[in-house]
Image: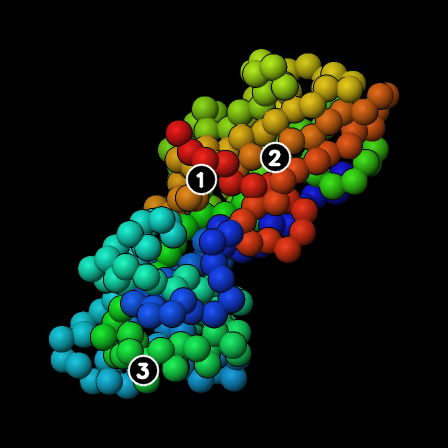
Amino acid sequence: MIAICLTCMLQASVVAGPPDGATGIVVDGSALEIDRARFPRVYDEGDNMIYPPDKLCADPNYQGFEGYKRCVDDAVKDAKRVGGKPWVITPLRLKGNDPIHGSVVVNAEDAVALRRLNVERGLLDRDRVAFVLGMAVAEAEPAGEAVKAKPEAPVKIKFSKALADSCADNASLLSVTTADGTIVGGKVRYDADSKTLVFSPSSPWAPGTKYTVRVSHLIESDLGGVMDADYVFSFQVAAGESHAASSDRPGGAADGGARPAASG
């Protein structure tokens, strides 16, 4: 089966470059296996450290980072830390050779903008920075173009981070329904090695039927990160043993995928 890779899935509202009058920086690590660190760092692609800047490092009151957030929504609402108009950036990757997995690398354009914002507004010097632990769906299947698949092919949801034990055993956090809202019976198991939830239907998928998969935004990583909205995608089973899957793109991804649905 074809799986759709979903990167930067929570960035629907993020514009290219910082907004005018930016009041803070939100570093969204939802799609990365980022971990908590006492002194998380932000680097450019040339391995030059941008954050924390020298002025902040020299401040005797700066004894460690205190701005970790569960999701992007929590971060942007923390006006005390990032003000009322924060800029959300998505790092390229984790910093290599960092055993703590607490530091990230940003692209060249974002690096320039960060340095400029610090010169103009002192956002980094004043530690107006939040890091999002978050959670994202890295891959989902069945998805993509029409492909051959067995009628009992399972639904697989691979996450960017390991799930909390309480979520790995909670089948209510993943549901599969038909177009009329009928809940599809089945079993859910979690493969810790691949960070994947697997749903196996009790009966084979019905030919010609459209199914909708919903992953609750309440699902939590082992570090406490969550998604900002439910993750939803659909697939339709064709006649015989083939199916065609269709899905709406999550925020910020370039093509294909599934879109976070409004929670509630």
Residue designated by label 3: 120
Instruction: Please tell me whether mark 1 sits on a helix, a strand or a loop.
Output: loop
Residue designated by label 1: 229
Instruction: Identify the residue at horizontal 30%, vertical 71% (top origin).
Output: 39
Residue designated by label 2: 233
In three-dimensional space, the C-alpha distance between marks 1 and 2, rounded to whole angstroms, equals 13 Å
Instruction: Please tell me whether mark 2 sits on a helix, a strand or a loop.
Output: strand
What quarter of the picture does the C terminus occupy?
top left
For label 3, count other residues whose C-alpha is less than 10 Å away and answer few (under 14), some (14-19) or many (20+): few
x then y, percent, for residue 122: 27, 79
Q: Quadrant of residue 202?
A: top right
Q: How is the image coloured?
A: rainbow
Instruction: Please tell me whether mark 3 sits on a helix, a strand or a loop.
Output: helix
- Amino acid beneath label 2: Phe
Q: Nearer the viewer, residue 40 or 54?
A: 54
Residue extending furthest left? 61
